[in-house]
């Protein structure tokens, strides 16, 4: 929800900026993923953004291997140059991938997080995200990711 604030195409669009609708979509996406995985287990895969961000080399290799594609040196070169520093604006592909998924902890206010969590309980549970129960020092210590990710 935090990153959507910086997208001009999202402003004023309830399907994009209202957590109720976004999380309803996430629940629907999960249900669709379950169905596709049942029908096409060797052709369909899910991947959480945070898993890719925290382990870009490992996850890129897993995805490429899953689809039968070679792990090329150019992929590693791209990851070396695009996952270690923030360069450019909100649409840049250059990000410190280890910190990018957790920017919301500094940018969202507690009341915003509580509102999002209250409207996204089911989606968060399905996709493997923890809720913040204790807002004392959460920005520094809270890890929202549960292990393992869904569908592994």
Image: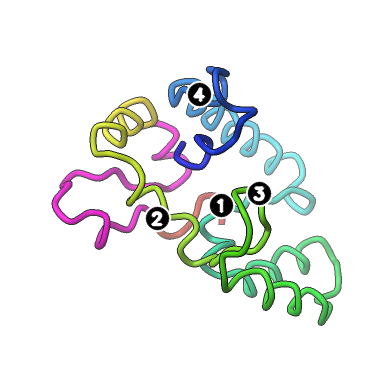
Residue 115, image x, y percentages: 30, 28
> Which numbered disc flags the more N-terminal residue, 1 or 2?
1
Q: Label 1, label 3: how many angstroms apart (C-alpha)?
A: 19 Å
**Residue 145 disc label:** 2
Percent from the top left, x then y, of residue 39?
75, 39
Q: Residue lying farthest bottom?
A: 73
Check disc 3 and report its element: helix, strand or loop: loop
* Circle 3 crowding by C-alpha within 10 Å: few under 14, some 14–19, many from 20: few
Under circle 2, the secondary element is loop
Q: What segment is highlighted magenta in the picture?
A: 121-145
Q: Which residue is drawn at 61% across and 52% down?
A: 89
Residue position marked by numbered label 4 in the rendering: 24
Residue 95, position in %: x, y? 58, 63
Residue nearest the viewer, comparing 87 with 21: 87
Identify the residue at image location x=62%, y=73%.
Answer: 58
> Does residue 135 show up magenta in the picture?
yes
Q: Closer to the N terminus: mark 1 or mark 3? A: 1
Q: Which structural element holds mark 1?
A: loop
Q: Where is residue 31 in the image (x, y as percent from the top left)?
A: 58, 31
Which residue is tagged 1? 48
The reply, left or right, for residue 148 in relation to residue 12 is: left
């Amino acid at each position: 929800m935090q990153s959507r604030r910086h997208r001009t195409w999202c402003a004023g669009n309830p399907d994009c900026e209202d957590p109720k609708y976004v999380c309803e979509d996430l629940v629907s996406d999960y249900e669709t993923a379950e169905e596709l995985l049942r029908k096409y287990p060797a052709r369909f895969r899910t991947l959480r953004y945070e898993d890719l961000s925290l382990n870009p080399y490992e996850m890129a290799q897993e995805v490429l291997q899953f689809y039968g594609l070679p792990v090329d040196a150019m992929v590693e070169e791209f990851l070396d140059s695009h996952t270690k520093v923030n360069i450019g604006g909100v649409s840049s592909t250059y990000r410190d991938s280890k910190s990018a998924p957790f920017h919301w902890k500094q940018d969202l206010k507690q009341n915003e997080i509580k509102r999002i969590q209250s409207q996204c309980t089911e989606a968060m549970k399905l996709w493997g995200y923890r809720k913040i129960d204790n807002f004392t020092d959460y920005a520094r210590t809270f890890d929202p990711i549960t292990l393992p990710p869904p569908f592994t």
